[in-house]
Amino acid sequence: MTLYGRDAVLRELVPRMVGLHHTKRKAVRQEPRDEVPAVLLHGGHGSGRTAVLDALREAYADRVPVAAVDCAGVRDDDAVDGAAVSNTSPVAELLTGLARGLSAHCPGFGRLRLPRLLTGLVAVSAWHRGELDEQACARERVEALLTDCGLEKNPERARNWPGDVLDRIGGWGTDELGPVAAASVQLFTDRYLGFRENRAVRQWYGGLADVPTSQQDDNHVLTALCRAFHLGEGMRRRIEVHLVEALLEDLRAAYTGWRHLNAAPRPLALLDNVHTAAGTELLDLLLARRVTAAERPDPLVVVAATLGEPHGDRYAGAARWTAANVPGLREWRRGGEPGDPAAGLVTLPLPPLDADELLSMMHVGEERAVRQEVARAVHRFTGGSPLGCRIFYDALDAAPEPAAVEPHELTRLRLAGEHVTELMLAALVPDAGLSSYLVLLSVAQDAAAARALAGAYLTRDHQAGAVEEARSHLRDERWPQPGRPFVGDDFLRAVLVDELRRRPADATDPPQPWPELHELLRRHHEDRGEHAAAHHHELAAGRPAEPARWLAETLHGPATDRWLTDLWHIARAPHPPDPAWADVCRATASGERDGTLAGADSVARSVNRLLHAVWYAADPLSVPDAHLRGRIGRELDFLSFEHPTGGRALYAASQDWPAALKEPRTPDSAVERREGGEEGRGHAIP
């Protein structure tokens, strides 16, 4: 499957920046020729951010120096400080990963050498005497650098780094860190750097003006750099700045001479999850050092990915492009305010797949082609999420007869023995404990309802913290903030509700009997005087009679807008785990079951048909056809003549609701208006 909507990054943008075709050994004119902007891809969960970076790594890994690091894979500063290991930091770990990737051997290219960065990392890795955790950290980091950067062929000697350093120390005195730092640097530069590299490294570090040392010979500068790093906080940040400078200076030195003249393909750094504290800090450092040395551009191509929109004004000066409109790079120049680091950045959103892209993706061949309504149901359920679309695609491709699959059977599909929504949930919420909480809370309409569920279905030890833990997770992972409904993202909620619906009533994590669960929530909202919310759960439990009766009784009230909002809210109830639900719902909506409403008048029968039609049409896996949408319009039109004062609003709804359900979106008249004129959530139907 191609990277629909993302090909511009893989096929156009990055090849021009690197100077090499993404699949062929064919040079591409490098753009721009001097300074290269960093690219920041952004999108929500399942938007394909990591997939794009993985595709770039696979395309270039064996042809140019490529480093791929996951910024979410390092400990944050609190964890580091809590472990009392002062010779590491998130930025130092990420720079170690970049060094290992960029220095890997590439056939036809050779191996980059990064002597300044590696010497700096060795220096800050020095440990205090007797600190075994610090010593273990130094061993792990230096061993990885020596072996992955091709400096040491003997694995045993790489593992014995701390012992070799200690052998070089003549005496300790009262200093527990300085001798280790000096011996580490001396051992590394003598053993692994040539004469010219050694001299260049010492001259470069000796030229740093802000390293706190009273003696400016080379050894004292690197030892002072180590001491400052171990102090943590602001002092550590200053040293991390120099480590980033060392990386960029090494790359400048590596791309002079024949590489510059021949426009050799540029190295590529792929940074995933830069929305984390460590990732944000590293990207900010790279951008800041580039603007400081703008007259001496480095060759590094940086493609980063962040979850959600870039926050606040941090990158206000960045250029904003779209995947559908990637302009020429040849004329790119920094914009924004002079000296603004963000002016060296280009942001590129990764939007959801549109319906046409999904239809093209789902066409797997004439004999096995998926029906259009199935592809449309996939788009409604996932909201165009590449993650969800890919899982459905693979499951349909693996099905014996994909052309025979009905829309409401999609979530019954399996892939590699697991239900499709299981796979989606594992990708969207990897933590099993949290996903279990969220599955239970997915049908809650607000935080109070979520707490009621936790109190009824979780053990006492978990009742108090489950809701807050779920809220914190949704906030930290940049999902829509819990409100109404509690899980605000349509795709995530659809996955969670399907998992809740599918789990048996005797499940133990925790037990979740569908009818009893919704009866509990019905009572909860009824006790609070929230009648529409109560009938929402009555309908979800598979008992439509009472919601239909209540809607018929309240139709003639003066607040027709409120009635339409209540109708929509009730009809957005998740359907019960009944395989016959869709058939019964459609039959009721078409009037085939009017005879079951003994004694009902024409208004009650119309409201019952309307409720079932909207319930079916609003379901995430339904594809309401023209007949069903027309039925909704005709019922609302009929009711407009039956209302003494609100006929105009009902007639307007008869025109808007069928069109809204086709798009699909929440009808304008169904959007809840809150006090002060603030609109409630008007999400598109998933």
Image (spheres, grey):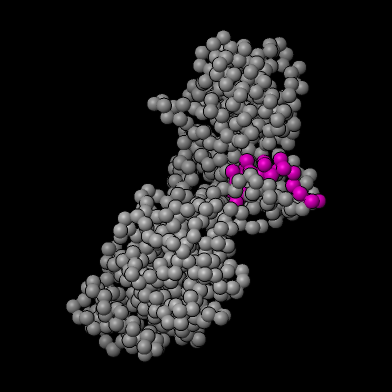
Total marks drawn?
A: 0
The segment highlighted magenta reads 366-388
The residue closer to the viewer here, 352 or 578, is: 352
Q: Residue furthest left?
A: 214
Q: Residue furthest top?
A: 644
Q: Residue furthest front?
A: 331
Residue 75 visible (yes or no): no
Q: Residue furthest right?
A: 367
The residue closer to the viewer here, 411 or 149, is: 149
Quarter of the figure that contains the N terminus:
bottom right
Residue at 49 percent of width and 80 percent of height: 111
Residue at 50 percent of width and 24 percent of height: 530
On screen, residue 260 versus residue 62, left or right, reads: left
* 386 in magenta: yes
Residue at 52 percent of width and 62 percent of height: 13
* Magenta stretch: dominant secondary structure: helix
Residue 432 against residue 447 in the figure, above or below: below
The residue closer to the viewer here, 263 or 136, is: 263
- Residue 488 percent location from the top left of the image: 51, 39
* 314 in magenta: no
Res 577 → quadrant: top right
- Residue 300 percent location from the top left of the image: 44, 70
